[in-house]
């Protein structure tokens, strides 16, 4: 049997939308044989199958996934576009830092996008510049855009070629607005969550929107609070702060909190590691360090 490849771009209740990459057309996917358990298929899954006479895509096989995001359920995510804003809503670096840790653990490359720059005063831009420098120094790409004026959108699109991307970030920062700008598809805010007819259960239909040359982008509902420590062992978190790597400490299992002769703490003291980032780390560890006051204001 000659199997063709498709990508699941829509997953809602019992519906599976399979995008045929060559034709750029969506078929209703019907799991067959070994893949009968349809609930194990997610948006972002690459599937192999055949086109049937009644115009459905008979799914014979699912490609092994490289990752699976939980919120929203999207598989094989290449890149997370973490959208934040300096104003409306106010920037919360702790929330951003938690998201960065989670994506780093999943092996997903991340770009930080400050949206709503049309709202900023000169003073705000000065503040934004400081945040930009902090995250760039850590190694993240930082983009400044406006979904309203379109500024910076071209640069953002150039990041997303041939990839499965997901927009994530706090509520109200303009993720859905940016998605519309990128793909040209008009979306209502909050469209992602819909009540099912059964009433009691809320289903979260997930959709990847195709654009450009086989690029796909998915929206996600806004987060109001994210704690990396709920996703992984607290001890692991230090591995996902890129700027902590390469320093040596007296104890090989140093948590970079209360231990003496800690290379990371020394680096914070010397200003090599940003205080705000280290403070986020301590908060994730639920550790309060009195001595921090001496080096960080
Ligand atoms: N001034 C300005 N307003 C924007 C911009 N982008 C989005 N907005 C507005 O911000 C509000 C929230 O935008 P959404 O796109 O719904 O935000 P969201 O991140 O998808 O929010 P959730 O779905 O709740 O997580 C809307 O009123 C948008 O019109 C922007 O670049 N500039
Ligand atoms: Mg939205
Ligand atoms: Zn240490």
Image: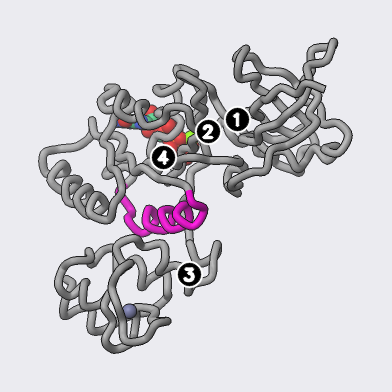
Q: Secondary structure at mark 2?
A: strand
Q: The C terminus lies in which quarter of the figure?
A: bottom left
Numbered disc in front, either 3 or 2? 3
**Mark 3 Cα-neighbour bin, 10 Å: few <14, some 14–19, many ≥20:** some
Identify the residue position indicated by label 2 in the image: 218
Specify which label sits upstream in the sequence, 1 or 4: 4
Q: Is mark 3 within 8 Å of ligand 3?
A: no
How much space separates mark 1 and mark 2, taking CA atoms? 6 Å
**Mark 1 Cα-neighbour bin, 10 Å: few <14, some 14–19, many ≥20:** many
Marks 1 and 2 in Cβ contact (< 8 Å) = yes
Numbered disc in front, either 3 or 4? 3
Q: Nearer the viewer, residue 230 or 215?
A: 215
In percent of the image, x 22 and y 47: which residue is there?
Answer: 132
Identify the residue position indicated by label 1 in the image: 207
In percent of the image, x 78 and y 16: which residue is there?
Answer: 51
Identify the residue position indicated by label 3 in the image: 236
Q: Secondary structure at mark 4?
A: strand
The answer to whether 248 appears left or right of 2 in the picture is left
Residue reaching furthest to the front = 1
How much space separates mark 3 and mark 4, taking CA atoms? 23 Å
Quarter of the image where one finds residue 253: bottom left
């Amino acid at each position: 049997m000659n199997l063709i490849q498709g990508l699941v771009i829509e997953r809602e209740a019992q519906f599976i939308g399979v995008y045929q990459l060559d034709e750029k057309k969506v078929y209703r996917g019907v799991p067959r044989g070994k893949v009968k358990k349809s609930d194990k298929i997610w948006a972002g899954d690459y599937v192999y199958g055949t086109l049937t006479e009644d115009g459905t895509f008979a799914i014979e096989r699912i490609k092994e996934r490289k990752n699976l995001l939980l919120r929203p359920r999207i598989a094989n995510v290449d890149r997370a576009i973490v959208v934040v804003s300096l104003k409306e809503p106010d920037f919360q670096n702790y929330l951003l830092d938690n998201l960065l840790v989670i994506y780093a653990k999943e092996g997903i490359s991340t770009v930080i996008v400050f949206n709503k720059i049309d709202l900023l005063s000169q003073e705000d831009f000065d503040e934004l510049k400081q945040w930009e420098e902090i995250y760039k120094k850590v190694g993240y790409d930082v983009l400044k855009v406006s979904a309203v004026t379109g500024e910076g959108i071209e640069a953002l699109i150039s990041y997303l070629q041939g990839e499965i991307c997901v927009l994530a970030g706090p509520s109200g920062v303009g993720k859905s607005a940016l998605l519309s700008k990128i793909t040209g598809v008009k979306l209502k805010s909050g469209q992602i969550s819909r009540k099912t007819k059964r009433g009691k259960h809320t289903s979260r239909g997930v959709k990847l929107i195709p654009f450009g040359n086989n690029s796909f982008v998915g929206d996600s509902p806004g987060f109001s609070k994210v704690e990396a420590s709920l996703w992984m062992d607290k001890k692991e978190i230090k591995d996902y702060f890129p700027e902590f790597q390469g320093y040596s400490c007296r104890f090989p299992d140093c948590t970079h909190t209360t231990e003496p002769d800690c290379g990371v703490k020394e680096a914070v003291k010397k200003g090599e590691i940003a205080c705000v980032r280290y403070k986020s780390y301590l908060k994730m560890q639920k550790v309060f360090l009195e001595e921090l006051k001496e080096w960080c204001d």
